[in-house]
Image: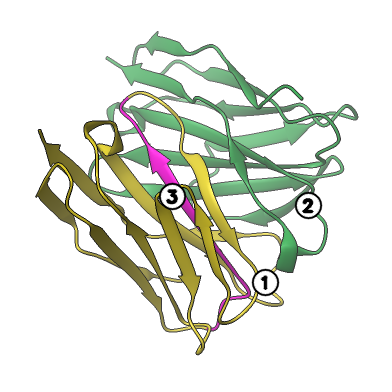
Chain colours: A yellow, B green
């Protein structure tokens, strides 16, 4: 199946630092979604992107849909302890039905 | 609007048993997708149902099956449980229309432990 390469796999940062993570695909995507998952819970949608080049913010989070439609990044500014969790990217490929493909996740640890 | 609900939240079974998990999507959503999440494999797609029909299927054995009812609620069944089936099972709800603008919303998951 379709593989999404998400990096980095894990990050350990100091509170207040900015964070950047990204996803790449070998296929063109027509949707990019970013989720955050905390232990024992389901992923929560953070940002949805639907157009190449689209840049969307949600508070301290900003995500962009790459121009090539094969990548996306998520930035978190001024990190705080509650940002801890696993961040997943997901996307859908044109003409493949309503199936979404997920990255392997970026585990974020924020050190107070 | 209520979110996606899954029942039960936790389940303990023994090898060889079968299990049924339930998912109620967001009101108005007609697509339900199921995923298996394990520490080593990440989120693995099981199948997607739309308007009571299985529309997409992942690479899981036939022991994993599902169905969807006319009210869009979905159930997933795993027969002859194996130790490796221990995982968090997530369902995701979406409108199921125009995938280019669709978004999936997840439930809290069912944690299945097979002993």
Disc nearest the viewer among 3 and 2: 2
At label 2, counting other C-alpha atoms closer than 10 Å, the crowd grade (few under 14, some 14-19, many 20 or more) is: many
Q: Position of residue B69 (x, y in %)?
A: 84, 28
Q: Chain of mark 1?
A: A
Magenta span contains residue B71: no
At label 1, counting other C-alpha atoms closer than 10 Å, the crowd grade (few under 14, some 14-19, many 20 or more) is: few
Residue A14 image-quadrant placement = top left
Would residue A49 be visible to someone looking at this image?
yes
Magenta span contains residue A34: yes
Q: Chain of mark 3?
A: B
Q: Which mark is residue B44?
A: 3
Between residue B68 and residue A80, name the one nearer to us. Answer: A80
Per the image, label 2 sits on a secondary structure element best described as: loop
Is B42 left or right of B108, judged from the image as shown?
left
Disc nearest the viewer among 1 and 2: 2
Is B4 left or right of A47, judged from the image as shown?
right
Vertical comparison of B49 with B14: above or below: below
Q: Which residue has dot 1 on it?
A: A96
Labels 3 and 1 in the same subunit: no
Give the magenta-colored segment's residue range.
Answer: A28-39
Do tag 3 and tag 1 residues touch (Cβ < 8 Å)? no
- Residue occupying image coordinates x 87% and y 43%: B51
Q: How many marks?
A: 3
- Residue occupying image coordinates x 86% and y 35%: B28
Q: Position of residue A72 (x, y in %)?
A: 43, 72
- Taking the view exactly as shown, the residue that stands out farthest to the right is B70
Q: CA distance from mark 3 to mark 1?
A: 17 Å
Q: Which mark is residue B96?
A: 2
Vertical comparison of B2 with A71: above or below: above
Vertical comparison of B35 with B73: above or below: below
Would residue A5 be visible to someone looking at this image?
no
């Amino acid at each position: 199946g379709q593989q999404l390469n998400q990096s980095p796999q894990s990050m350990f940062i100091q509170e207040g630092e900015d964070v950047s993570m990204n996803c790449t695909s070998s296929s063109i995507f027509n949707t990019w979604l970013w989720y955050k998952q905390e232990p024992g819970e389901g992923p929560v949608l953070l940002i949805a992107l639907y157009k190449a080049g689209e840049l969307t913010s949600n508070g301290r989070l900003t995500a962009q849909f790459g121009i090539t439609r094969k990548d996306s990044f998520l930035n978190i500014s001024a990190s705080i302890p509650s940002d801890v969790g696993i961040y997943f990217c997901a996307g859908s490929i044109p003409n493949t039905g309503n199936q979404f493909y997920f990255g392997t996740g970026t585990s974020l640890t924020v050190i107070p | 609007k209520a979110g996606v609900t899954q029942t039960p939240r936790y389940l303990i079974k023994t090898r060889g048993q079968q299990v049924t998990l339930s998912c109620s999507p967001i009101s108005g959503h007609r697509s339900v997708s199921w995923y298996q999440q394990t520490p080593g494999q990440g989120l693995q797609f099981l199948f997607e149902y739309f308007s009571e029909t299985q529309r997409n299927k992942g690479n899981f054995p036939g022991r994993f099956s599902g169905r969807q009812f006319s009210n869009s609620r979905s159930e997933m069944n795993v027969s002859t449980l194996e130790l490796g089936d221990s995982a968090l099972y997530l369902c995701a709800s979406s409108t199921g229309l125009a995938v280019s603008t669709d978004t999936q919303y997840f439930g809290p998951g069912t944690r299945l432990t097979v002993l």
